[in-house]
Amino acid sequence: MKKAVMTSGVFIFAVSFAIMASAALNSNNNESPEENQHSVISNYKGNNYNLNESQIRKVVTDKNKIKTELKNGECPDNCTCTGSMIKCELKNRTREMTIYAGKSENIIVQIKGKNMSTNVTLYKSEDGKLYGTFKNNETREVKMLPYQIKEKLIEKTSKILEEDNITLSENGTYTYEGKKKSKLFFFIPLKIKVRAEIDSATGEIISTSKPHWWEFLTKDEEKQLVGASCGTVTPGYNDACCKDKGYDIWNVASGECVFSN
């Protein structure tokens, strides 16, 4: 009888804790992103990837400007403009970018099936590179493209991420918001909100959201990206795998594909 009572008590405690954690999860939906942000790169100080005056004059032209309301003759080079939709070739014609109008004067940029929204003024140069004019009128190349962000985060965390929302901000960073798959008490499936900031010029993960207080009761489902970090196809500085993924070089020290200056 005593064993039955104890077992029943443990079960009730587990269920009660599950309800509490679930309530905490739901209440977290109302947290502001800033309240749940945690820096993971303490030495991040920004990067000087801004263009000089000569480069700006060449890139920042009305002809190169990405906009959804076009007049005759305004379509950028190597782009097809139909109504309010623009399709452009990027990175030596290895990627296609589609741009269309979003909400609140934002534009939606889609590359390899992955969307990001922004109100940043974007330019597509003749050589197929994407640039943005950011805060304080600073212009620099957007090297990290939307489709690379989720892969970078999965590679770093080994988490299964879903329900992605990506925004390019005026300070030159991407904000990634999504959910990771997890299990409460190892058997109750749930999804936990995650957030990260990534530098659009370097691909560096600046910060990620801190764990919730109750996450010690959960176990995240993991996903290993085989070969995602490359270095296995042609190990060395000019890794063919890295170039195929849209990066420039293989960084032996950090063990990942990166962009060169």
Image (cartoon, rainbow, N blue to C red):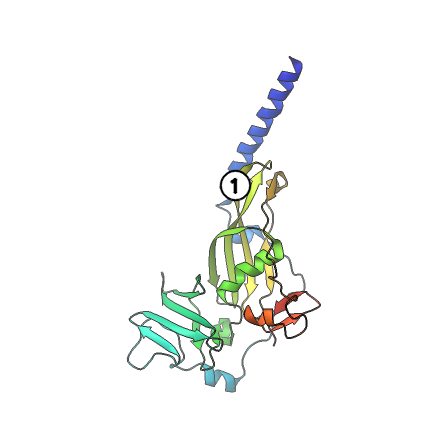
What crowding class fits label 1: few (fewer than 14 Cα within 10 Å), some (14-19), or many (20 or more)? some
> What is the residue that sits farthest to the front in this orientation?
233
Furthest toward the right, the residue is 253
Front in this rendered view, residue 113 or 68 = 113
Q: Secondary structure at mark 1?
A: strand
Is residue 150 depicted above or below 201 in this figure? Answer: above
Q: Quadrant of residue 115?
A: bottom left
**Residue that protrudes farthest toward the bottom in the picture:** 54
Residue in the picture at 61% in, 61% down: 227
Q: Amino acid at mark 1?
A: Leu
- Judge whether 261 appears above or below 116 on screen: below
Q: Nearer the viewer, residue 30 or 73?
A: 73
The reply to whether residue 150 is in sight is: yes
Q: Position of residue 19 (x, y in %)?
A: 53, 32
Total numbered badges shown on the rendered structure:
1
User: x, y (%) of residue 28?
Assistant: 52, 44
On the rendered image, what quadrant is the C terminus found in?
bottom right
Rendered location of residue 162, percent (x, y): 49, 51
Name the residue that disc number 1 marks: 190
Location of residue 107 in the rendering, given as x and y in whole percent from the top left corner: 39, 66
Q: Nearer the viewer, residue 60 or 91?
A: 91
Residue depicted at 57% across the width and 36% down the height: 187
Vertical relation: 167 (above or below) 9: below
Above or below: residue 134 compared with residue 56: above
User: Does residue 45 show up?
Assistant: no
**Residue 256 sits in which quadrant?**
bottom right
- Where the N terminus falls, by quadrant? top right
